[in-house]
Structures are given as structure tokens and as C-alpha cells.
Amino acid sequence: MDSEKIIEVRSLTKKFKNLTAVNNLDLNVYKGDVFGFLGPNGAGKSTTIRMLLSLIKPNYGDINIFGKPLIQNRKDILRRIGAIVEKPDFYLYLSAYKNLEILARISGADTSKKKIMEMLELVGLAKRYNSKVKTFSHGMKQRLGIAQALLHDPELIILDEPTTGLDPQGMKEIRDLIRHLSIEKGKTVFLSSHILREVEIIATRMIIINKGTTLVEGTVEELLKSDLMQVTVSVDDTEKAKSIIDLSGWQNNLKHIEKNDLLFELPTKEVADLNKHLVTNDIKVNSLVPVRSLEDFFLKITEGVSK
Amino acid sequence: MNTIIYVELQKIFRKWRTYIGFIAIGVLAPIVQIALYYEGSGYVNHVTRGLQDSFFMSGNLFNGYLIGYIILQALYIHIPFLIVLVGGDLLAGEATSGTYRMLLTRPVSRFTLVTGKFLAGAIYVFLLLAFLFLVSVVGSLLIFGTGELITIKGKLIIFASDDVLWRFLSAYGFAFISMTTILAVSFFFSSMVENAIGPIMGTMALIIILLILSVIPIDALHEARKFYFTSYMGGWDGFFTDPLEVTDILRDAGVLLLHIFGLYGLTTYIFIKKDILS
């Protein structure tokens, strides 16, 4: 990878009394990445994000952001980062506008009404700019959280579960926004999410951690391709198809039969060959649906570790 | 630093609880003034009844200065409870509301943040005392007029009217140090917990306990008084003695300033080292 490293973490370790929340974690995020950060609950994701933002101090390890050590360059680095950490909390007794104005002022960003209204417009809250945040729903606070993260036009955006509490339309809007920020604006996005479909759709690279340790890291495409794929083949004659499969060498790949559907687990590159084999043996293949997804991959990887 | 102070003041003065202190003073001081307006001469007669046989009292003894002095004495012990409402919330309030996360991921050092918060708290203390001065001294002077100030501290002391204003200003200056000590105590407690109720109640309880221990007539407890910061908070009254007890005033102010800087330093250290888990 020739791209500039935006985040480089080496041997990161954080212990809370007897609990090791993050254990010798390594990760790299490159410029322009939409980096998916995955792991089951309690995997150490939030602790890692808090360490990346200097909210908590590691017991051991190095964090370099924009090529500089975080501890010695905290202020300069934070000036270039926008973040949502877990749920977005604001000063409930202040309006959305006032909250953003205060945060922009502390960030040394543009505090003009035009800029703040632009941010509120971006997340669909312009009409409620003067409402106190205590009157906002969780979804609205989430949107305001995204607005505050983008206020000072950061180069790196760290989003911890940014679509939690949003309706499907809101989730799509945030996904589109992340894509826009990455592709059009060239921002690097570090995205922690428990919605695996979301990461699968928008992430370019990802890491899966569990018990504070890296399980896999790479591009989403590579990781999904590198494993066996599940595919459901719908045929017109199940009995005939099964007898052909029994003689084909794929019999061990056939995992389940239900009505006209045959569920296979096999390497991705063999799917086309299987289809061709069935068709040339006079089996009508009505559909061939891959069921291989990030969710399956994630469960397999994390369950393997849990066991 | 100015930005942080500005932002913190905005946060302080947009909270309803901030105004409890101003409302309490704004209500209590006029009640005392109105009561004294009708009963005041009786009060002066009561205070001076033992002296009227020996001395001839002339001039306006029942005046704005006396009312201001009475109100300050009456309210002084209660002002700390108004200070802790704000001081206890300065840091713990951010943890309770979860806003630490947003605040501390901004390009501002923790030292600047904690110092800015403390200074904003000190400005609140100053404004509260300035309001008390305005309502109790300036207000009383407008209603009752000026005159000599009569005080009794084992002996009768009468200050000429042109010798009183500077004493009030100095006493309020000392009160600022005293009340900033209360702020520092509640600020310190506020840095250690994640709920503002704890530091508010904790500081109030500490003040009450120390005040009670101070007045229990047991020798051992009396000796321990010198270790209670509350024992030095009444030093403002030293400006209403003749001759002025400069040494005592300076000693009391010095002890309180040591408390302020010590507690602020400790709070800063804790805050800089703290892992933000809220």
C-alpha cells in the first residue's frame, strides 16, 4: 500500500484493573479509506476510539495520526479530526444552533451564522435550529452529532455507530453523506458500526477485532473473497440435480436441500463451474443467489475466536 | 483561554440553577430592608440600650451602611450554599450529560479547559457578590441614606460615614476569597465524580460539619478549629474593627488562598490524568 497512512496504531494495550479491553492491537488507516471497524459488543472498539481521540490513555503502544505521535501533538491532530463517540450528547438546555456555535468556537472554526446553518441544513435540522436539544429525538441528536463532527472541515472523521437510532431513510442519507465525504471531498472515514450491511456497502477496508485483538484486516473485497461462499441454487428437478452433484465431486459442498433449493458452500471461483456443470447436464437453473455476506463472515470469524 | 471562559460563562448563565443565588439574594435582601424600614429604630435602640444611659446618641445611626452590614452578616453564612450549586456542576455536569466526549475531542488542552472552567466559576462568584453589594449596600444607601456605622465587638465602635465605604469594599474583596475557596472545594469534588449531586451535597455537608464542630464547646475540638478552612472565612469582619486587625486579616486570607491554589492544582492534576469513560 503506497497511500499515506492517516492512522497507524502499534501494540495498543489498555487495561482496566483486571480487564484487558484492548490487547496489543495494530491497525492502519490510509488516506481516502472508509475504514470499517467491527467487533462484537465488548470487543474493545469504543476503548480504541477513545484512545485515538486521547479521551483515555493507553497502558502501552503507539498511536500516530497524520504521521505524528498523538500524545505529543494532541492539539494539532484533534484540529484535523471530527468525531462522534458513542451516543451524541449535547447541552440539552441549549439550542442546536448554540451547541454548534460553542463547539465551533472551541475548535477555532468558522462561527458565522451562515456556516452553522449550512451544517444544520446538511443534516436536515435547519428548521429546528432554535429548538433546545432536550426536545430532540435520538435520531435528531445523531444528525446533530454528525453536524458537529463536520463543523471544522476535518480531514479525518471518526464515527462510532453514526446511524444508531435513525430510520431507514436517515440511515441511507448518512451512508450517502459518508460516501460523498470520502469520494467527493477526499476525507478519510473511520467507521465503527454494528450494522454490518452498512460497512459492507460503504467501507473500502476493514478490521474485525474481538477481545481487544485483531482478527482480520484488509479490503472488504479481499476478505469476502478469501473465504468459502454460500450460494443457493434453485433448480427445476431437485432429485436429478442431486444425483448429478453426487457424481460431480461437489457432493461434500452441498449442505442443505429444501424444495427446489440446494444450498452449497464452496470457493467463490467454483460457482460459475457448478452452474455450467448443472446446465450442461440438462438441469434448468432458475436462480443462483449468493448468501455470502459480511454478516456470515463476521459471525464465523468472531464465533471461531469465542470458541 | 478567553474562548473557554466565554463559552463556560455562556453555559453557566444559560442554566436555571445559576439564577437561584441571584433570586435568593434579590428576595431576601429587600425583605430585610423592608422589615428594618418599619422596625429599624427599635433595632438600634435594642442594640444600644445599655449605652443610652451613659451616652447621648445623635446623628443618623440607622442608615444604609448599618443595613448593609446587617444583611452581610445574616447572608454570609448562606452564600456558600449558592456557590456550590454552580461549582459542583462545573466538571461533574459535563460527565453527567456526556458532553466531556465532545469537549475533550476539540483542540484544546485539558489544562486550559479546567482553568477556564475554574475562572468562569470565579467570575460567577464575583458577580454574585457584586449583586449582593448592589442590593444590600447600594440599595440600602438609596433607601436609608448614609451615616455613621455602629458595630459592637466586645466594645462599641462607631465609624465616621466617610470611613465606611472602603471597609465594605475590602470586606467584599475578602468575601470573594472566602467564596472562591468554597468554589475550589466543590470544583475539586466535582472532578472526582460523574454526577453533580455528589459534589454539591458533599461540599454542603463538609461546610455544615466544620461549622458545627467549630461551635461545640469542647477544648479538643476548639483546638482543631485552626485546621478548618471555614474558621478563616469570617475574616471579612476584621475590616469593621478599630484598630484594623491587619495581621489576622492577612493570615486568614493567606490560608484561604493556599486552599484555593492547592485545591485548584489538585483538581487540574486529577483532570489531566483522568480517563474519560462517561
Image (cartoon, coloured by chain):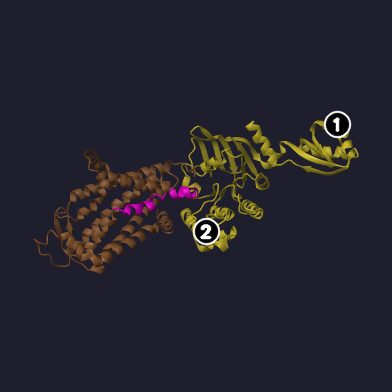
Chain colours: A yellow, B brown
Q: Residues within 10 Å of mark 1 (few under 14, many from 20)?
A: few
In the rendering, which numbered label is found on residue A96?
A: 2
Reading the chain from its start, which is encountered first: label 2 or label 1?
A: 2
* Side of A246 where A169 appears, left or right: left
Judging depth in this view, the residue of A299 and B138 nearest the camera is B138
- Please state which amino acid type lies under the numbered disc 1: Asp
Q: Main secondary structure of the magenta part?
A: helix
Give how far across and how far down residue A287 sits, in percent: 83, 44
Picture residue at 36% right of the left edge, 56% below the top: B124
Question: Is residue A67 visible from the viewing direction of this image?
Answer: no
Residue identifier under label 1: A246
Picture residue at 55% right of the left edge, 57% below the top: A136
Q: Chain of mark 2?
A: A
Question: Is residue B195 visible from the viewing direction of this image?
Answer: yes
Judging depth in this view, the residue of B165 and A134 nearest the camera is A134
The image quarter in which residue A9 lies: top right
Q: Chain of mark 1?
A: A
* Side of B169 where B17 appears, left or right: right
Give how far across and how far down residue A58 sits, in percent: 49, 37
The image quarter in which residue B138 lies: bottom left
The magenta stretch is: B77-101
| 3D distance between C-alphas at marks 2 and 1 | 65 Å
* Side of A46 where B203 appears, left or right: left
**Residue B90 among those drawn in magenta:** yes
Q: Are marks 2 and 1 in contact (CB under 8 Å)?
A: no
